[in-house]
Amino acid sequence: IQQITEQTKQVHARMAGIKHKLVVMSGKGGVGKSMTTVNLALAFARQGSQVGLLDVDLNGPCVPRMLGLHGHQLTMTPQGAVPPTGPLGVKVASMDFFLDDASPVRWKGPMDVSPVWLGLMEMNVIREFLADVAWGELDYLLADLPPGAAADKPPVIAGFIPDLAGAIVVTTPSEVASDVVQKSVTYARDMGIKVLGIVENMSEYRCPSCGELNELFEGNTEAMCEVLDLPLLGRIPFDRKLARTFDKGAPLLDESYPTIQRYQEIAGRIRTLLDYK
Ligand code: ADP
Ligand code: MG
């Protein structure tokens, strides 16, 4: 218990120089949470801010790979573990740097331990990690939180980050049809986390052969935002070309590219929401 208290204090000290701490969450995996987090980080950086990205998905930390930083390391200094810098000066701290393939926390395949135990182990590893990372001065820190496979996990980890400015929820038009987004918003609010708004990813899906817009889910996200009393921060179209550049670790950074402009607009809205809080 004492060690946990010490580490928690240290996490607070490590993050004291960060102005706005945001978490990005989603109801389930695969909706483009990492894609959104990374692109919003780049968007804030493009607007002249100092930005950090925290990737705490133990099972699939993918942020370094997306930014061409896979295989990089935190630099150990007497002041702490200094994160490497990716495109546009974005600092990246990922469990991917911290764990080697032999590490017991990189569990792959079936494991004969209880989920509760796994959860505790994960939490300890993440707390220890956060107590080490020396961020320095930042305007924004964006945390890519693991999806709620155990639906309660994201907010619990969010609890490690002191003075959280809020959460951004990523969803897709089809995910909205289920109640998983609504549940995670409710859970975050129950934990005292302010949800800033929703980003709809992979919207405007067009049939690859005929180019026609899929209208099956049109309007669902707006309706959900209304129910939850949340702003729709923006929509990101299904954009295979852009996504592929991140999958390859050589992200497209051209700010005149339409989808990148969408991310810039969303970052601008978040900035405004935080300024007038
Ligand atoms: P999550 O973090 O929610 O699990 P990812 O960000 O890793 O999801 O995205 C899952 C996959 O979908 C990735 O291969 C990514 O390149 C792709 N993807 C994400 N957003 C988009 C988009 N707007 N258009 C096309 N592909 C996307
Ligand atoms: Mg992800």
Image: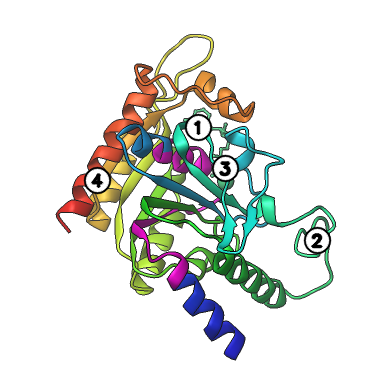
Kindly tell me whether mark 3's CB lies below 8 Å from ligand 1: yes
Mark 1 or 4, nearer chain start: 1
Q: Is residue 107 left or right of residue 213?
A: right
Answer yes or no: do the residues labelled 1 and 4 have beta carbons within 8 Å?
no
Tag on residue 87? Answer: 1
Q: Quick check: marks 2 and 1 in contact, CB under 8 Å? A: no
Q: Is residue 163 above or below residue 109?
A: below
Provide the residue span drawn in magenta: 13-41
Mark toward the start of the polypeptide (3 vs 2) = 3
What amino acid is labelled 4 in the image?
Arg
Mark 4 Cα-neighbour bin, 10 Å: few <14, some 14–19, many ≥20: some
Q: CA distance from mark 1 to mark 4?
A: 21 Å
For the residues bearing labels 3 and 2, Cβ distance under 8 angstroms: no
Q: Nearer the viewer, residue 186 or 33?
A: 33
Compare marks 2 and 1 and give the one earlier in the sequence. 1
> Badge 1, how many Cα within 10 Å: few under 14, some, many 20+?
some
Q: Which residue is mark 4?
A: 271
Task: Classify mark 4 as within 8 Å of ligand 1 or not, answering yes or no.
Answer: no
Say whether residue 49 is left or right of residue 128: left
Residue at x 54% of width, y 83% of height = 6
Residue 92 percent location from the top left of the image: 54, 46
Residue 245's disc is none
What amino acid does circle 2 point to? Ser
Name the residue nearer the viewer: 154 or 260.
Answer: 260
Decide which of tag 4 and tag 2 comes sooner along the chain.
Answer: 2
Please state which of the two labelled residues, at mark 1 or mark 4, is closer to the viewer. Answer: 1
Which dot marks residue 103? Answer: 2
Q: Amino acid at mark 1?
A: Pro
- Horizontal and vertical percent for residue 216? 40, 31
Q: In which quadrant of the rendered view does residue 57 lie?
A: bottom right
Query: Which residue sits at x=64%, y=51%?
Result: 74
